[in-house]
Amino acid sequence: MNDCMCPYYSLNKRTLNVLTTMRCNAQCRFCFERDTARPCEASTNDLIAAINAVGAEEIGLVGGDPLVHPEINRLILESNAKDIYLTTNGIALVEDIGILEPASIRKLMGLNISIHAPSIAGLQKVFGREIPADYFIGVGAWCHYAKRLNPAVDLRIHCNLQRGVVDSMSNAQEMIRLAESLGVDTVRFVELQSLAGKDIEMFVDAKKDVFKNFESYSEALLNPNRDGCIRYLPRLSERVRTEIKTICPLTTVVKDFTVEELEEGLATLELLHQREVEGNSPLRVLYPDLRVSTRYDDSLTNEQRSYEEMRELMLERIAYKQSPEYEIRKKDAEIA
Ligand code: SF4
């Protein structure tokens, strides 16, 4: 495994994110690759060899934008992974509908298109660049083309929740209507992760700020992974599935997690550890031992913690949340 490979905390499969390139045709302020200095311009041969050596069942091709990788079709076609997903901002699909060859599209299990605003003006603000006026028409045309070639391909919009762009239920409904018109299968609302300094002002809490009416959407233990937990929303559309990807209390402190969320994170950690001990963890193949990658201050540096260290940290955080000291601080903050 090389620095371009990031295993997920998947419970059921050997899953791997592959950082295909650092280059991107957009400049999002919240991009968590922006300030990292990971070497990720490995040669195509090295990337393919590393993917196939790990033997991952599922890979996510990410970036940067994988579609600016000059050999993206080769990467897809020569990888042995059964399930291949690719995440793009869609600009390259609009500029060249044929950028992914038919054989590549037929091999894809899913494609995530990062559309973080329901209007061209909003997208320009988020992507930090001019967006073609026909961007939505182009994405819709590509989605129909892809479905004709591969009816099973799962097409999903990723919409990062962002203060001032998509931060309310009415914005979410606009995104859902857009998703319906584009012909995708799913729209996934995503809480921003790995924010630092003043960027924290951009953070939107999915449950508190947007989907306030949903008491419970917890299926986190079914699907925890490296950078969040997928939860299903009650049906908001006849045609598209709606999901939330919430940040995981094991990996970040951006959000003021409730005791319930912290306990859920701890339960996830215990489950991962138990599978590790029993020897049936998919992670065993990817990591020699269970180490959780965390960001526990407002820097953008990942720290690796062992199961024991991580467990202690989570117990401390739960105890603090339940302590009189926390209650006093909360009251003081409310008064201020
Ligand atoms: S599109 Fe994705 S990779 Fe590109 S700058 Fe935005 S967040 Fe980063």
Image: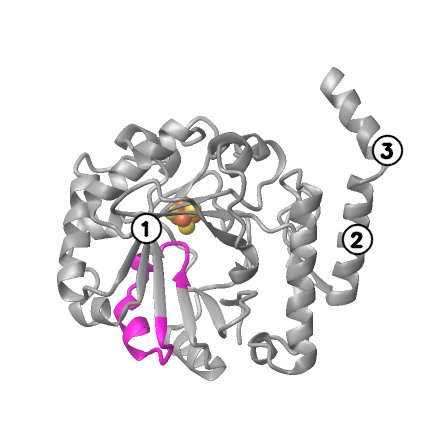
Dot 2: within a 10 Å radius of its alpha carbon, few (fewer than 14), some, or many (20 or more) residues? some
Question: Does residue 124 appear in the picture of this structure?
Answer: no
Give the spatial CA distance, label 1 vs label 2.
Answer: 36 Å
| Amino acid type at image mark 3 | Glu
Q: Is residue 215 above or below residue 313?
A: above
**Mark number displayed over residue 186:** 1
Q: Is 230 displayed left or right of 304 in the figure?
A: left
As rendered, which of 57 and 75 lies closer to the eye?
A: 57
Name the secondary structure under disc 2: helix
- Report the span colored magenta: 61-83
Indicate yes or no: mark 1 CB to ligand 1 under 8 Å.
no
Indicate yes or no: mark 2 CB to ligand 1 under 8 Å.
no
Dot 1: within a 10 Å radius of its alpha carbon, few (fewer than 14), some, or many (20 or more) residues? many
Name the residue that disc number 3 marks: 325
As rendered, which of 123 and 3 lies closer to the eye?
A: 123
Dot 3: within a 10 Å radius of its alpha carbon, few (fewer than 14), some, or many (20 or more) residues? few
The tag earlier along the polypeptide, 3 or 1, is 1
Q: Are marks 1 and 2 in contact (CB under 8 Å)?
A: no
For image coordinates 74% across by 66% down, the residue present is: 306
| Amino acid type at image mark 1 | Thr
Give the spatial CA distance, label 3 vs label 2.
Answer: 16 Å
For image coordinates 60% across by 81% down, the residue present is: 280
The tag earlier along the polypeptide, 1 or 2, is 1
Name the residue that disc number 2 marks: 315
The tag earlier along the polypeptide, 3 or 2, is 2
As rendered, which of 197 and 220 lies closer to the eye?
A: 220
Q: Is 27 displayed left or right of 33 in the figure?
A: left
